[in-house]
Amino acid sequence: MSFKLRVVAFVLAILAVPLTSHLWQRAMMSIYKTKHNLEELIAKDGMGVFFQRCCIAVILMAVMWLASQYQEADIPPAVAGPKPPPRQAPGQKKDGQQEVPRPKAD
């Protein structure tokens, strides 16, 4: 390994520690904020409303998944695109007649 490559690897390793800790802090703050919002919703509306909304979300996800499965099953193979024309043997014309070889010019 060259010296410059070692220095770059070392600098990246040093910078990785504060960068990852900053990213983890932001992720945890987002999780805590979401938890706080969820606790407020449950305190305001109650557990029954919360579970109803969860059930509606699960039903919607299941319906969307089933719809995508049916769409994939209904697509015929012809929709994928036109079939390429069949390959012809060398020396054969399109209408099936044999081609007469031409004499080569000198």
Image: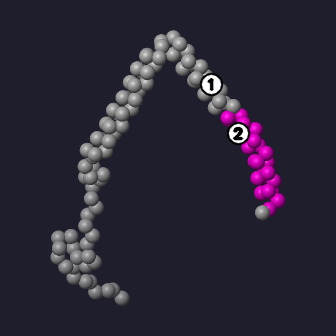
Q: Give the range drawn in magenta.
A: 2-24
| Quarter holding residue 2 | bottom right
Colour theme: one colour
Quadrant containing the C terminus is bottom left
Mark 2 vs mark 1: in front: 1
Residue at 21% of width from left, 73% of height from top?
A: 93
Separation (CA) of disc 2 from disc 1: 18 Å
The image position of residue 29, as x and y in percent, is: 65, 26
Q: Mark 1 points at which residue?
A: 32
Earlier in the chain: of badge 2 and badge 1, it is: 2
The three-letter code of the residue at mark 1 reads: Tyr
Residue 83, position as x, y percentages in the image: 27, 59
The label shown at residue 52 is none
Binning the other alpha carbons within 10 Å of mark 2 as few (below 14), some (14 to 19) or many (20 upward) gives few
User: Residue 96 or 12: which is nearer the viewer?
Assistant: 12
* Mark 2: secondary structure: helix
Q: Which element is circle 1 on?
A: helix
**Left or right: where does residue 7 sit relative to residue 24?**
right
Identify the residue shown where x is 54% and y is 20%.
38
Q: Does the magenta stretch include residue 5?
A: yes
Between 1 and 63, the one lying in front of the other is 63
Image quarter hosting the N terminus: bottom right
